[in-house]
Every structure is written in C-alpha cells, then in structure tokens.
C-alpha cells in the first residue's frame, strides 16, 4: 500500500460546481498535512495546511479524519482558474520527509 | 512571485558535461530540499539539508552531488548524467525543527540530457 494515495482523476466539472477530493495516508502517526496546487509545468504552490478541526479559506475547505486516516479538500463555486493538479502532502516519519500523493487532476469546464 | 529562487530555469547538457543547479532562499528557513519531478508524476525527494548538514539522501546516484554552502544556498552538482535524468528539478525550503510547517518551492530547473 502506498503511504499517501489519491484518485488521479481527471475530475471534469462545470463552472460553479462543488467538487471534493480525498487523500488517504497509511501512517497513523502522521502529524502534518497540506494541500498543494500544481499547474502544468510549474512548481507546486501551497494551497492550505490542514488542521485537526478543519479549516476554510474562501471557497476551499480542508478536513482531517484521523480515525479513517484521510484528508479532504472541498472546492465550492469552481472557477476555470481552479483547473490544476491538487497534491496531498503528509509528513511521514521524521521531521523532513514530506510524502506526496500522486495528485488529482481537476478540469473546470466552461 | 516565489521566495525560493532557482537558476537556471532551463538547462540542456550532454552526458559528459558538468553543470550545477542553484537555489537561494531568504526566508530564514534552515531546511532545504531537492526534488526531481517527471511529467505527470509527483515530486520525488532526493536530498534534505537541515542546518546546513545533509540529513536525508534517498539513495540518489552519485552523479548528483548536493552542497549547502550556507543557510541560504543549496546547490546540486551534476556530472555524467543519463537521458533518464531529464526532468524538472525543484528546490524547496521550510522551517526546521518543526513537523507542522509547509514547504515553499522554487519554480524549478527544467533539465534535458542529450
């Protein structure tokens, strides 16, 4: 089993739709979780950290479910500019090992 | 605008060449990373430096040689690379000594080996 797993997609959704991605992780001792966004041929950019109580930033909501070992990202009112690959990142054993999921590709259609 | 600067943006080299990739950050981060990313794949960790000391080497071939001259700079020296080493090379930094801080990435060097 991979340490961090994501559905690669693509998720094709119309503008204005709500879309959600999940990311599962295998190490129950993991403490820190992040969502990054990566555009084609660009570097990953931090979208948001994921906190235990869940957190929201505008149209984006991140949640953590420790019991089932997954994190989620919800995007409301999708925009064309949201089209990108969304990478889930979990800090594994040791402080500096950031483990990336394979990414979920989102296409928002006009 | 990225706070982690990488040079060059693009590099084409032959298999017998020696070149270096450079990375600089001025955020006061004491952990710096090199990643390799192939198309449609996630970044793959190569090296981690914390407090200017190599703390993780993910069994990277010796044709890649990292160097951390000071807390702001990270280099990756390349020698006798293979065509399969063609990829996007990403540098990242983060605060050290904490498990909760995200990484910040440079915009990468796109490397092509002829």
Image (tube, coloured by chain):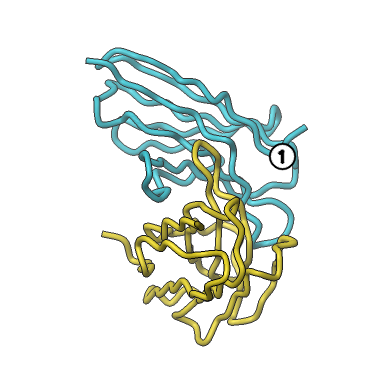
Chain colours: A cyan, B yellow
Q: Residue at x 64, y 32 (%)?
A: A5
> In the image, is residue A97 above or below residue A86?
below
User: For the view shown, which residue lies furthest in the right direction?
Assistant: A1
Letter of the chain that mark 1 sits on in the rendering: A
Position of residue A67 in the picture relative to residue B102 (left or right): right
Nearer-the-camera pick, B101 or B25: B25
Image location (x, y in percent) of residue B5? 35, 68
User: For the view shown, which residue lies furthest in the left direction?
Assistant: A110
Give the quarter of the image for residue B50: bottom right
Q: Crowding near pointer 1: few (<14 within 10 Å), some, many (20+)?
A: few
Looking at the rendering, in which quadrant would you find the N terminus of chain A?
top right
Label 1 residue SS: loop
User: For the view shown, which residue lies furthest in the bottom direction?
Assistant: B69
Image location (x, y in percent) of residue B114? 50, 57
Position of residue A55 in the picture relative to residue A100 (left or right): left
Give the quarter of the image for residue B105: bottom left
Q: Residue at x 47, y 46 (%)?
A: A49
Image location (x, y in percent) of residue A42? 36, 47
Q: Residue at x 40, y 25 (%)?
A: A106
Q: Which residue is mark 1?
A: A3
Q: Residue at x 50, y 21 (%)?
A: A9
> In the image, is residue A61 above or below residue B38?
above
> In the image, is residue A83 above or below residue B8?
above
Looking at the rendering, in which quadrant would you find the C terminus of chain A?
top left
> In the image, is residue A89 above or below residue A19?
below
Position of residue A52 in the picture relative to residue A82 (left or right): right
């Amino acid at each position: 089993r991979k340490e961090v797993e994501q559905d690669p997609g693509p998720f094709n959704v119309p503008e204005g739709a709500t879309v959600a991605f999940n990311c599962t992780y295998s190490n129950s001792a993991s403490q820190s979780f992040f969502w990054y966004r990566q555009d084609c041929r660009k570097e990953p950019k931090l979208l948001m950290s994921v906190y235990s109580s869940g957190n929201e930033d505008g149209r984006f909501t991140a949640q953590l479910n420790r019991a089932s070992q997954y994190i989620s990202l919800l995007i409301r009112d999708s925009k064309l500019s949201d089209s990108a690959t969304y990478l889930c990142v979990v800090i594994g054993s040791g402080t500096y090992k950031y483990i990336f999921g394979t990414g979920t590709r989102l296409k928002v259609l006009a | 605008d990225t706070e982690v600067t990488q040079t060059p943006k693009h590099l084409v080299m032959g298999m017998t060449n020696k070149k270096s990739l450079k990375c600089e950050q001025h955020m006061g981060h004491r952990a710096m990373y090199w990643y390799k990313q192939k198309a449609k794949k996630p970044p793959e960790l190569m090296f981690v430096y914390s407090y200017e000391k190599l703390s993780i080497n993910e069994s990277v071939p010796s044709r890649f040689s990292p160097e951390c001259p000071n807390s702001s700079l990270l280099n990756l020296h390349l020698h006798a690379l293979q065509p399969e080493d063609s990829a996007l090379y990403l540098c990242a930094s983060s605060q050290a000594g904490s498990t909760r801080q995200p990484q910040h990435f440079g915009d990468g060097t796109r490397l092509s080996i002829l």
